Image: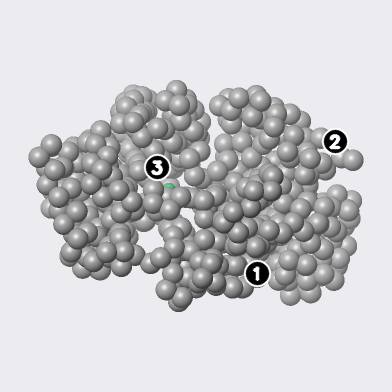
Amino acid sequence: METQTAVLEALSDIVGSAGCLANEADVEPFVTDYRGAYRGKAQVVVMPTTTAQVSQVVAWCHAHGIPMVPQGGNTSLMGGAVPDDSATAVVISLRKMTRVLAVDTINDTMTVQAGVTLSAARTAAENRKRLFPLRIGSEGTCQIGGNLSTNAGGTAVLRYGSMRDLVLGLEVVLPDGRILSSLKGLRKDNTGYDLKQLFVGAEGTLGIITGAVLKLMPQPRSTVTAFVAVPCPASAVKLLNEARMLSGEAVTAFELISAPALDLVLNHLGSVQSPLQGRYDWMVLIELTAGTEEEHLNNSMMELLERGLEHGWVVDGAVAASLADGQLFWRIREEISDAQRYAGGSIKCDISVPISRIAQFIEKASAEVQSLEPAMRMVVYGHIGDGNVHFNPLRPVDQDAREFLARWSKPVSDLVDDLAHAENGSISAEHGIGVAKRDSLEGYKAPVELDLMWQIKRALDPRNLMNPGKLLPLNHRAPPADQ
Ligand code: MLT
Ligand code: ZN
């Protein structure tokens, strides 16, 4: 094994000494995840600026048997982007690869380096009067490479799909340093396996994404947003169905918010008030967007809410009268994640079930979780238009966060995951697996799926050096021995 000094020297030769960090304080932000839930150690953090440098760094680490942890904005909730505590790994951060290489408004594509933040990508598209539609709360920090590696979803998947749907080509450095590139921007290419999709959602276990061609969309000409109280999740699902019948594609977002989730945000933000006068158990944030004039879209929203009232699926509602109103509705929704982080003691479950089973899932899971500890706050929210519920029980007000998590994290997660699985669902809808769900995955995926996942891993990374210990359950198949 090389000494830390030798690793630092070799990597500095490739990227320059300004692109390498080894001092403990400098390395700290790269070995701790954004919630402070996962901490590891690294020999060196290296920050290449070009794909050629990434390739050389990877080839060197591969030749010397050094584990590599690719890292984007480090906003993952699952511990997938930080090293373990063996202090053997090199973190390869893409944060200096921030160039938007091309925006092609005829092909409607954008070519970017992996370290471009999501908000920079959205701005680059906007500057050319296009939309890059991925929308998640961490957009200022998360990076396109990480978005692709985790197949990020967010609040506009209902209309535009997740990262898997938004990518046309990738550039990837393989675990031995070879470069695989499909940065052509083709909408049709039927020449065999779609290799790029292997790397989407692979959480950096098969290689490092260094560049991508992304799809651009027309910018909507009008947007109407409503914050609506519904009696229960079943009514929310009926309203969603009605919205899609009435407005089809225009339904861009449909987000469920429970009362404890709203309370937490209002408490966290202090000065912000609920858009609704009364206090309700359940709310939905609905966004319609279209290329048509505002008036038409407004009428669609009013018709939807009237029908909702008639059927008893809607009990109150506010339609944004200005851009600022709409921004406030969204702020409330997007702050739920941070509000939980500040409160501490939040058990993060990110499940999906078929939309037709959401209501029964929420009902059962809430009853069973509360029978364990009735004072848990049921912070339940998410993208119900995609069947995706963030079911995140929060510690009772008077309980210590650490004690609460030590006692309840595993039993509650297992219970929620089992119920989702029983409803034909997934234990990770959009946050990925990382280390948080790595071992439980074994209980929910068929052995043949896990066999194939390990076979793909072995084929691409026979020495198990690329983000080892992430995503693939260790017990199912022991990682192959060093070759
Ligand atoms: C969200 O929808 O807000 C995100 O997935 C993040 C989270 O749940 O913490
Ligand atoms: Zn989400």
Residue 65 shows in the view: yes
Tell me the amino acid under the disc marked 2.
Answer: Ala
Tell me the amino acid under the disc marked 1.
Answer: Met
Q: Tell me, for residue 136, which label it has, or none.
A: none
- Provide residue 226's location: percent of width, then percent of height: 22, 55
Residue closest to the far left: 310
Query: Which of the two discs, 3 and 1, labels the residue nearer the N terminus?
Result: 1
Q: In terms of image quadrants, where is residue 180?
A: bottom right
At 85% from the left and 36% from the top, the residue drawn is: 481
Q: Tell me, for residue 386, which label it has, or none.
A: 3
Asked if 100 appears above or below 262 in the picture, the reply is below
Q: CA distance from mark 3 to mark 1?
A: 32 Å
Mark 2 crowd level (few <14, some 14–19, many ≥20, 10 Å Cα):
few
Q: Which residue is mark 1?
A: 97
Q: Which residue is mark 2?
A: 481
Asked if 180 appears above or below 305 in the picture, the reply is below
Camera-nearest label, 3 or 2: 3
Asked if 258 appears above or below 209 in the picture, the reply is above
Q: CA distance from mark 1 to mark 2?
A: 33 Å
Q: Nearer the viewer, residue 185 or 449?
A: 185
- Provide residue 267's location: percent of width, then percent of height: 28, 54
